[in-house]
Image (tube, rainbow, N blue to C red):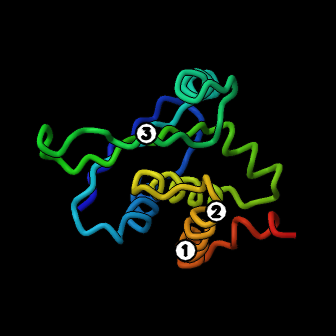
Amino acid sequence: MLELDLQRASQQPAPSDEQFRQWCELALRQRTADSELTIRLVDEDEGRELNHTWRHKDYATNVLSFPADVPDELLDIPLLGDLVICIPVVEREAAEQGKELQAHWAHLVIHGCLHLLGYDHIDDDEAEEMEALERTLLAELGHPDPYADDES
């Protein structure tokens, strides 16, 4: 079971609660245990502040993943962590990259959830594994390959 805390800290339009739940459940279905996570939707000011604080980069980024780092013996809940998604960045990227907005939202939520599960894209092998899984999950939703333009 998924417990999703969706925090809308921005007045800008965003997908529905049901869409966020669908995307998270799809990304997390390989996990047999219950899952608890928070998604916080923010504007650029908060996105930039968090990215600066945690990654030392002075700009807002599309999604930040904060995996829970709590020892199992101290906390007996299925806490995965938090995602922070910057609405204006998502919208701008979709327009600049010629991607359908809902497909880009789905991709970023799935991408963030996979980070919470421990997937990464620091080295080429890890990136290939993570991107292949993202492609498969997005195809199940009927969305195109988000990396298709990167390979040309």
- Which type of secondary structure does the marked residue at label 2 adopt? helix
Q: Which residue is mark 1?
A: 141
- Residue type at numbered disc 3: Phe
Q: Which residue is mark 2?
A: 103
Distance, label 3 to label 1, CA atoms, is 25 Å
- Residue type at numbered disc 1: Leu
Across and down, in percent, residue 22 comes to 42, 64
| Comes first in the chain, label 1 or label 2 | 2
Q: Is residue 152 above or below residue 84?
A: below
Pointers 3 and 1 in contact (CB under 8 A)? no
Distance, label 3 to label 2, CA atoms, is 23 Å
Q: Which residue is mark 3?
A: 66
Pointers 1 and 2 in contact (CB under 8 A)? yes
Q: Can you tell which of label 3 and label 1 is closer to the viewer?
A: 3
Q: Is residue 112 left or right of residue 147?
A: left
Across and down, in percent, residue 60 comes to 66, 30
Q: Quadrant of residue 97?
A: bottom right
